[in-house]
Amino acid sequence: METGPLIIFIGALVINAGSPGPSVAAMVARVISQGWRDVIPFMAAMWIGEVIWLSVAVLGLAALAEQFYWTFLTIKYLGVAYLLFLAWKMWRAPVDIGPNEKNAPKGSGVEMFFAGFAVTMGNPKIMIFYMALLPSIFELKAVSVGGWLELVLITLVVLFCIDTVYVSLAMRARMLLKSPRALRLSNRLSAGVMGAAATAIASR
């Protein structure tokens, strides 16, 4: 694909992904409370969801996506409900064993994956980003399978880099937690952020 449009796409994707929204807030809150391993399925699901919206835009299926609006809305609210459940668990997490990987109940990898996938597929910000941006940058009818794979690879690399930065910063903040009191405060703050993120996603 031509270099100029690709550079524009990369720049726009960096700005969009780098602007911390509710999904990123939920991810960071989870990392601070649980550690980075617990959030890997959540991140992977977000990346897959973005690739799906990218593919829908490239294939010109915007009208089909609109027909399934209520399906996406239902998926989103199921994800929101699970995020609220995680926030509740964080708030009630025990702190008597110190700030380590066992300091709070964990969600299963499948549940974390579903939560990330649900909030991404139901996030209008992501949907509009790909549906509105791609047709204005590329001649989508001329995008080949190779071009689509190129866009997918670029998207995954950019998302990986940005989310890794957020996770690294969250882990640094987590390592500052040394006392049960600090850990309890962190869990409560993380629960508040997670709940606020779920509310923000639901209200969009």
Image (spheres, rainbow, N blue to C red):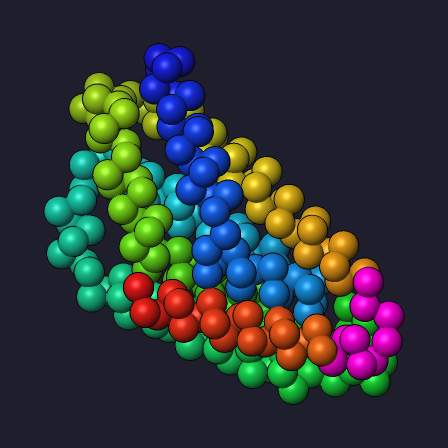
Percent across and percent down for residue 150 are 42, 24
- 92 in relation to 126, above or below: below
- Front residue (pair 90, 53): 90
User: Where does the magenta region start and end?
Assistant: 176-184
The answer to which image quadrant residue 137 occupies is: top left
Q: Which residue sits at x=18%, y=58%?
A: 68
Q: Is residue 178 magenta?
A: yes
Work out which quarter of the rendered image holds the C terminus and state it.
bottom left
Residue 43 lies, in percent from the top left, at 54, 53
Specify whether residue 117 is in view: yes
Residue 166 in the image, given as x and y percentages of width and height: 62, 49
Can residue 86 be seen from the camera position used here? no
Which quadrant of the rendered structure holds the N terminus? top left
Q: Along the horizontal axis of the image, is 24 left or right of 8?
A: right
Q: Is residue 87 magenta?
A: no
Q: Name the spot of residue 198 as percent of width and height, x first.
A: 44, 70
129 displayed left or right of 32: left
Q: Is residue 123 left or right of residue 132?
A: right
* Image quadrant where residue 172 sits: bottom right
**Residue at (32% x, 69% y) in the render:** 203
Residue drawn at point x = 47 percent, y = 43 percent = 17
Instruction: Relative to 12, say whether 83 is above or below.
Output: below
**How many callouts does the rendering have?**
0
Q: Give me the residue at 26% from left, 23% from top.
A: 138
Q: In the rendered view, tell whether residue 143 sits above or below residue 155.
A: above
